[in-house]
Amino acid sequence: MTTEDSGGGTARLGLAEVAALARDAHAGQTDKAGRPYAEHLAAVAEGVRARGGDAEQIAAAWLHDSVEDDALTREWLAAAPLTERTKAIVDALTKRPGEEPREYARRILATPGALLVKQSDLAHNADPERLAVLPEPTRKRLTEKYAGMRALLGLDEV
């Protein structure tokens, strides 16, 4: 991600700055297993990179839960020094209150670049090592939830 747009105008955050911002925004938050939430963000960003994602998708991976988790606001995202594509991906990955999974999946599929980020997110969320530390009912519920979303998105079970 460049520090300037193609017109030489507004400075954009670089990936290191986006990562630092995401870590700060989620400071003190933990995942369901009690691990620092930033570990999940880093894993999703790395998964996007490993799957051939570009800088805009990697930036979105760092920020993919920021609005949904109230770490950052929609207003912040709208005004953020990020590309419009990165903002659109983050917005697409932000679940709305009461939103049905099919609706959520449709928005992801309709947003260029969002599917790869969600694929990486689901892969990390469904990692057997991460799930193994959770109580059986929670592990079962989450495994079914992630498999259902993969199916809605047309992703292979691999």
Image (cartoon, grey):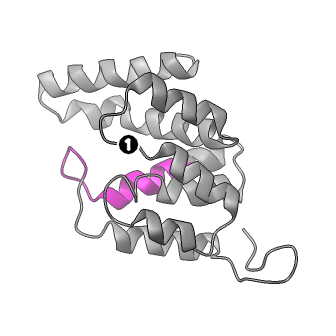
At 47% from the left edge and 32% from the top edge, which residue is drawn? Answer: 104
Q: Quadrant of the N terminus?
A: bottom right
Q: Is residue 158 visible?
A: no
Is residue 85 positioned above or below 6 on the image? above
In which quarter of the view is residue 128 placed? top left
Q: Which residue is mark 1?
A: 96
In which quarter of the view is residue 109 placed? top right
Is residue 130 positioned above or below 37 on the image? above
At 46% from the left edge and 50% from the top edge, which residue is drawn? Answer: 43
Q: Nearer the viewer, residue 52 or 95?
A: 95
Q: Is residue 48 visible?
A: yes
Q: What percent of the width, then of the height, locates residue 7? A: 88, 78
Looking at this view, name the residue that lies furthest to the right: 7
At 40% from the left edge and 17% from the top edge, which residue is drawn? Answer: 148
Left or right? Give the position of 14 relative to 101. right
Start-end of magenta stretch: 31-46
Q: Nearer the viewer, residue 95 or 36?
A: 95
Q: Residues within 10 Å of mark 1 (few under 14, many from 20)?
A: few
Q: Is residue 41 magenta?
A: yes
Q: Amino acid at mark 1?
A: Arg
Is residue 43 positioned above or below 12 on the image? above
